[in-house]
Amino acid sequence: MSDAEQQRKQAGPGGSSAGAAQAPASPAEQILSSWIAADPLSLELLEKARRIAATTSTVLIRGESGVGKELLACVIHYLGTGRDEPLVKIDCASLPRELMESELFGYERGAFTGAVQMKRGRLELAGTGTLVLDEVATLTPNMQAKLLRFLEERRFERLGATRPITLAARIVALTNADLEQAVEKHTFRQDLFYRLNVLPLVVPPLRQRRRDIGPLIEHFLAQLTELHRRPTLKVSSAARALLETYEYPGNVRELRNLLERALVQCQGSEITPADLPDRVLQSSPRSMTLEELERAYIAEVLDATRGKKGRAAEILGISRKTLLEKRKRYGLD
C-alpha cells in the first residue's frame, strides 16, 4: 500500500485525522499524497524511489510525456534526508537559450549589460537540496558541457565571477527523449549521459499500469470537485469501464484533463459516457482481463441494487463475505 493510500485511510473527509481540526497540508504532504501506487509496476517504482531517496546521487527519470516524471522527482526529494532543504525546478525547454546559463548559474553585477545587481542561479538556490532539470535533452551543446563540468567537479562560477562556488545539490534530470539515439546522432553528449544515468528510473505509461487508473480517478475527482466547488460526483460503471480500458496517449495528465472536462459538463451527480469525449467513446478497447470483467460486473450489480449487499451477492451467486472481500480488492467500497 502506498503512503498516499495509508494517509487516505487514516484521514477524514477533509484530509486530516478524523475528529481533528483541519490544517493545510504541507508541500511534502501534498506531493506524497498525489503519488498513487496501486499497480505492481507503480509499487515497484515507489520502492526504487525510496532506496534512491536515501542517497544523494544523480538521478535520471525517463518516460513518456504526462506519466508523472516531475512528481516522482518531488517524491524522491521529500522522501530523502534533505526533504527540508530547497526543491528547485527548471524547465530547460521553455527558457530561451540565451537565458539558460544565467538562470542556471546566476551572474555577478556588471557581468553584462542590464546586470544591475547580482543574481543567484537555480543551482545555487538549490543549495544542499534538489535541482530538477526538466527536458534535459533540449540543452544546447554549450550548456551540456557546463552541466557536465559541474557534475564532475561539483562547483561552478556565476557569470562574471572568478571564484568558484561548491555545492552538494542533488541533480534529478527528466526526459521523454531517447537519449541513446540522441548520443548516436551527436545531439547529446555521451559523457553527460553517463554522468546523469547514475540511478536511472523509468516511469511506465499509464496503459501499462492499469490498476492505478481507478485510484487515480478517485484522487482527481476529489481534487477537482474541491477546485470547482462541486458536490461529490460518482462515475457510472459504463463510464468507468471506458476510462479503465482507454489507452491514454497523454497518460496521467490526459486522465486528469478528461475528468475535469467530464466534471464541468456533467449535469447530474454521476459522470456517464455522455460526459466523455468522442476519442474515448470511439476508441477500440483492448480485450478486458477476467479480473477487469469481474470488477465491472460487480460494480454494475452494486449500482443496480443501490449497494444492497445481500441482494447483490444473491444476483452474483456468491456469499456476502466473498462480496465484501471482492469489493475491498477492487476498490468498490
Image: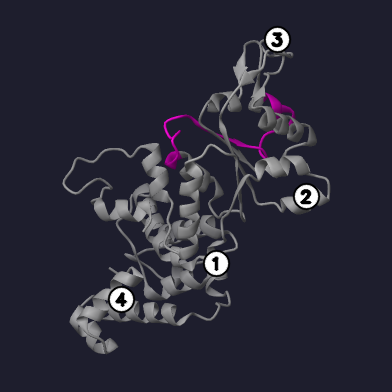
Amino acid at pointer 2: Ala
Q: Tag 3, which secondary structure?
A: loop
Dot 3 or dot 1, earlier in sequence: 3
For residue 182, the mark is: 2
Which range is magenta? Answer: 78-102
Q: Tag 4, which secondary structure?
A: helix
- Residue at the disc numbered 1: 208
Q: Is residue 29 visible?
A: yes
Q: Is residue 194 left or right of residue 320?
A: right
Could you tell me which residue is drawn at 47 percent across and 41 percent down?
A: 54
Alpha carbon distance from label 4 to label 2: 47 Å
Amino acid at pointer 1: Gln
For residue 315, the mark is: none
Q: Is residue 205 left or right of residue 145?
A: left
Alpha carbon distance from label 1 to label 2: 25 Å
Dot 1 or dot 2, earlier in sequence: 2
Dot 4 or dot 3, earlier in sequence: 3
The crowd level at tag 2 (other Cα within 10 Å; few <14, some 14-19, many 20+) is some
Quarter of the image that includes the N terminus: bottom left
**For residue 144, above or below residue 227:** above
Q: Is residue 233 magenta?
A: no
The residue lying furthest to the right in this view is 185
Please state which of the two labelled residues, at mark 4 or mark 3, is closer to the viewer: 4
Q: Tag 1, which secondary structure?
A: helix
Amino acid at pointer 4: Lys
Please state which of the two labelled residues, at mark 3 or mark 1, is closer to the viewer: 1
Please state the horizontal and vertical placement of residue 305, each as a whole percent of the image: 24, 80
